[in-house]
Image (cartoon, rainbow, N blue to C red):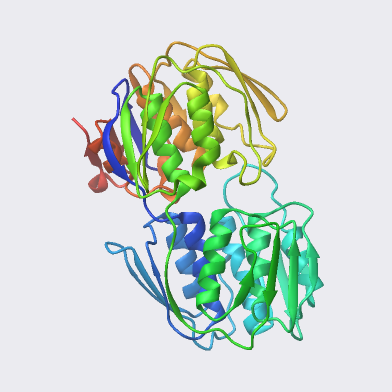
Amino acid sequence: MDHLVIQGGVPLRGTVRVNGSKNASLPIIAAALLTDEPVIIEGVPDLLDVRTMIAVLEGLGAAVEYDQERALLRIICGELPPAAPSADLVSRMRASFLVLGPLLARKKAVSLPLPGGCAIGTRPVDLHLKGLSAMGASFSIVGGRVEGCTEGLRGARIYLDFPSVGATENIMMAATLARGSTILENAATEPEIVDLANCLNSMGAVVVGAGTAHIRIEGVPRLGGTRHGVIPDRIEAGTLLLAGVITKGDLIVENLLPDHLKSLLAKLTEAGALVEEVGPNAIRAAAGERSAAVDLKTMPYPGFSTDLQPQFMVLLALAEGTGTVTETVFENRFRHVEGLSSMGARIQVEGRRAIVRGQPCLTGAPVVAPDLRGAAALLLAGLAAQGKTELLQAEHLWRGYCSLEERLASLGAQLKRISAEPERALFTGS
């Protein structure tokens, strides 16, 4: 498995550009299953999760062309012969389950392995199945697979017990080809939901209210092809902004949407960082004096994102004073604490609450990346720490961050990627 060796203590300085959104790309790729016409998606980052989703579609019979250099993806889902993606593919990434709704809507039958992904919580699929069942689908779970069928989906009024992003996306996609109107209440409001709705509407769907808790979808007989550009990745943008502050550096992060980052920017400002918009799609983040401890609580959007909680905890570990982190979205999202503690952080976990007593510095150590965002947190800690940090199982990073080590090196970071295949070893930095 790949790992990173990081020589810490170097402030990051310069300008860096954000890639297209992973969490917007994946459902939009799945949405291509709703039509037999070409779907062209711009700004798709070259990530392990993207490649997994491409492989899932290819396993279902789609023809896919991916130009990584241009971040351009072209998908044609023709007749889609009876097929099911392998359990190995689906077990790698929970977002693979997003093909459920489109396949039911278009083929009226589906067989999918239960999904995998980061071990950050149970994240049951019951909300997906409950919503689609209300639209006329029937499901059974046999031998670790979800078997679904329908004589034809019909519109329904659906209330989500929790504003699940994945369930909102799956139901919304299925409803585009259902008979009649679907009302989805307590829907997720994330920007990626809006981006998916915009793509669906460009294919001929009628989706109204995306970005609010009340979404209305009018079913249409068929959808056509489209060309759509995905939004910038707000989690990557937030990770980079935090990298500038945590390393006591000064970064300008370009190609982001400030409105998508309001909760993070407010917390950075509260902690004493210098945060300013330097253009319509660019933010400067710089360290002031030593950061002040703040309290943090993750919430569904527009609250503070659970996907930025591990990275922000690194800032609190180096802040002056004691801060708390309350995790309300995933019950197992403190798996990065073990690694931070081995680097000298003082963190006490009590259920879904972590008490973080700030230290003047962290010390490099061997640490194991537990999941995607935990890997990002430990990378940031290594960049700020005194001495050398070895980040094991760093391949988690490449599920969600494209060319991250090269871009960090361009900002002054000193890190070396050691590949499981010796010929692929890459050194960046000086």
Q: In the figure, is residue 64 to the left or right of 319?
A: left
**Is residue 197 something one can see in this rendering?**
yes
Name the image quarter holding residue 159.
bottom right
Q: What residue is shown at x 61% (from left), y 58% (from top)?
A: 211
Q: What residue is shown at x 70% (from left), y 81% (from top)?
A: 178
In the image, residue 414 lies at what x, y percent? 26, 29
Q: In the figure, is residue 26 to the left or right of 74?
A: right
In the image, residue 218 lies at what x, y percent? 68, 78
Name the image quarter holding residue 300.
top right
Q: In the figure, is residue 189 to the left or right of 394?
A: right
Quarter placement of the N terminus:
top left
Asked if 72 appears above or below 151 in the picture, the reply is: above
In the foreground, 422 or 426: 426
Q: How many marks?
A: 0
In the foreground, 36 or 296: 296
Name the image quarter holding residue 286.
top left
In the image, residue 231 lies at what x, y percent? 44, 58
In the image, residue 350 lies at what x, y percent? 71, 23
Quarter placement of the C terminus:
top left
